[in-house]
Structures are given as C-alpha cells and as structure tokens.
Amino acid sequence: MYRDIKPRFIKNRVITNKLTGEKIHIDRQFHYGIKIEGKLFSTFARETDDESEKVLASEIVKSLSNLDKLPKTIRDFNKDKFKLDIQNTLCQ
C-alpha cells in the first residue's frame, strides 16, 4: 500500500516548507522506513499492547542493519554503540 522509504543520508540541505515558506535546515540526518505487513501486521493489530510493542521493537532492532548503509566518511558516529543502546532500550 505504501512505497518503501529507502535508506538515505542527507549531509546538508535547506528546504522550504510549502505551506509556511519557512526555511528548514537539514544537517546530517539518516532516514529509512519500517513496514509491518502481512501476518506480522495481523499479529501486531490483534494482540495486547505488550505483544504489539514486542513486535515493533523486534522490527526496529532488525532495521538497524540499515545503518550499515551510512557513508564511510561519517567518523563521529559509533554505529555499533548506537545499535547496542537501541537493543538494550527496546529489549528490556
């Protein structure tokens, strides 16, 4: 139903809000999307809040492999430590 959001790194860009005309400065942001679909979505939608949170946490942890697509020129970001911090936070 929705198109995939492919991993994309934005180093430095200025965009203009179409509604307000406001200039927005984007500096060093990494974007990607997560889809929960099919049987996994059915499980997510009909289970309890705790079970749904576990499904979501699991998909987020799986998606961290997208960080491997970050450019090699980024040296001040520790991907491995970030992945570990996210895993520890979500999988408590």
Image (cartoon, rainbow, N blue to C red):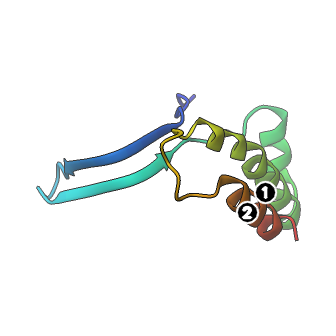
Around disc 1, counting alpha carbons within 10 Å, would you say few (fewer than 14), some (14 to 19), or many (20 or more)? Answer: some
The answer to whether residue 45 shows anywhere in this view is no
N-terminal label among 2 and 1? 1
In the drawing, does residue 43 fall left or right of residue 69?
right
Q: How far separated are the C-alphas under marks 2 and 1?
A: 9 Å
In the drawing, does residue 20 fall left or right of residue 33?
left
The residue where tag 1 is placed is 57
Q: Does the residue at mark 2 contact the one at mark 1 (Cβ under 8 Å)?
A: no
Give the number of the disc on residue 43. none
- Front residue of 26/41: it is 26
Please, which residue is most extreme toward the left here? 21
In the drawing, does residue 47 fall left or right of residue 37?
right
In the drawing, does residue 40 fall left or right of residue 63?
right
Q: Nearer the viewer, mark 2 or mark 1?
A: 2
**Residue at position x 76%, y 54% in the image:** 56
> Residue 1 at x, y = what percent?
57, 28
- Front residue of 37/34: it is 34
**Residue at position x 77%, y 41% in the image:** 41
**Residue at position x 78%, y 70% in the image:** 89
| Local SS, label 1 | helix
> Residue 75 at x, y = what percent?
53, 52
Quarter of the image for the C terminus: give it: bottom right
The answer to whether residue 10 shows anywhere in this view is yes
Total tally of numbered discs in the picture:
2
Around disc 2, counting alpha carbons within 10 Å, would you say few (fewer than 14), some (14 to 19), or many (20 or more)? Answer: some
> Residue 51 at x, y = what percent?
88, 60
- Front residue of 73/84: it is 73
**Residue at position x 79%, y 65% in the image:** 90
Q: Amino acid at mark 2?
A: Ile
Q: Quadrant of residue 49?
A: bottom right
The residue where tag 2 is placed is 86
